């Protein structure tokens, strides 16, 4: 029987952090399934889904604090997730671009939650606008709508909010996600 763990990691960015974590996971017969990692404000931060044999999980969990000596703090959540619990609904792709200002993520996520739409993946960045050099906020998200909700209802709600916020929003149907399919 396999056990699934979700690890959150953070440390001052430097070469070798991913290798240290991957080595420890491998030593305990773990498989690195999915991850999202980035350099943020001089720090390396991420989330990793790992699966490993049931009898090796406790050893990995006990060994994770040893990474602090290499500058990496790790927390672990033991999950009861299984392939049977994979959300197989078709997903939607949301793209948003607009002048950066506080509250963009809060307003969009509030509207989505109000519609019962689950945010499955969210990536954001701030960059300089090509001509003006002003701060431009970009977001890309994978969304899972309720089974009985029409795409047009979500699109209409987001377009109305986008007009108020003065941002551009694109919402498209995506092919079913292969996330969590187990081919690590």
Image: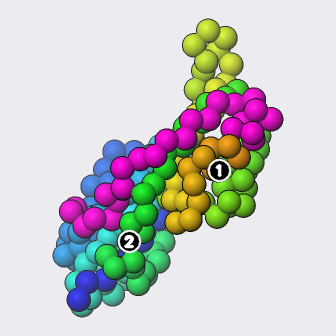
Residue placed furthest toward the top:
131
Q: Is residue 165 magenta?
A: yes
Locate residue 153 relative to residue 74 in the image: left or right.
Answer: right
Locate residue 61 relative to residue 30 in the image: left or right.
Answer: right
Residue that carries the numbered disc 1 in the rendered image: 153
Disc 2 versus disc 1: nearer the observer: 1
Residue 55 in the image, given as x and y percentages of width and height: 24, 90
Residue drawn 52% across the image and 47% down it: 141
Which span is picked out in magenta? 158-184
Q: Tell me how far mark 2 sits from mark 1, CA to CA.
A: 25 Å
Q: Is disc 2 placed on a helix, strand or loop?
A: loop
Residue that carries the numbered disc 2 in the rendered image: 86
Residue 163 in the image, given as x and y percentages of width and height: 76, 32
Callout 2 environment at 10 Å: few (<14), some (14 to 19), or many (20+)? few
In the picture shown, does residue 43 fall above or below 116? above
Location of the N terminus by quadrant is bottom left
Q: Can residue 92 be seen in the rendering of this structure?
A: yes
């Amino acid at each position: 029987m396999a056990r699934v763990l979700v690890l959150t990691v953070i440390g001052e960015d430097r070469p070798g952090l991913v290798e240290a974590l991957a080595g420890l996971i491998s030593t305990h017969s773990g498989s690195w399934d999915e991850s999202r990692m980035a350099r943020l404000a001089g720090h390396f931060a991420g989330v990793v889904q790992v699966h490993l044999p049931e009898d090796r999980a406790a050893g990995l969990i006990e060994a994770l604090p040893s990474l602090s000596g290499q500058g990496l703090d790790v927390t672990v959540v033991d999950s009861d997730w299984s392939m049977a619990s994979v959300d197989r609904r078709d997903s939607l792709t949301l793209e948003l671009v607009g002048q950066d200002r506080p509250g963009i993520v809060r307003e969009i996520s509030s509207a989505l939650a109000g519609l019962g739409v689950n945010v499955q993946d969210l990536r954001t960045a701030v960059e300089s606008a090509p001509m003006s050099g002003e701060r431009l906020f970009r977001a890309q998200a994978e969304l899972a709508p309720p089974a009985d909700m029409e795409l047009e209802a979500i699109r209409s709600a987001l377009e109305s909010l986008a007009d108020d916020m003065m941002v551009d929003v694109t919402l498209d149907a995506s092919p079913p996600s292969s996330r969590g399919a187990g081919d690590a």
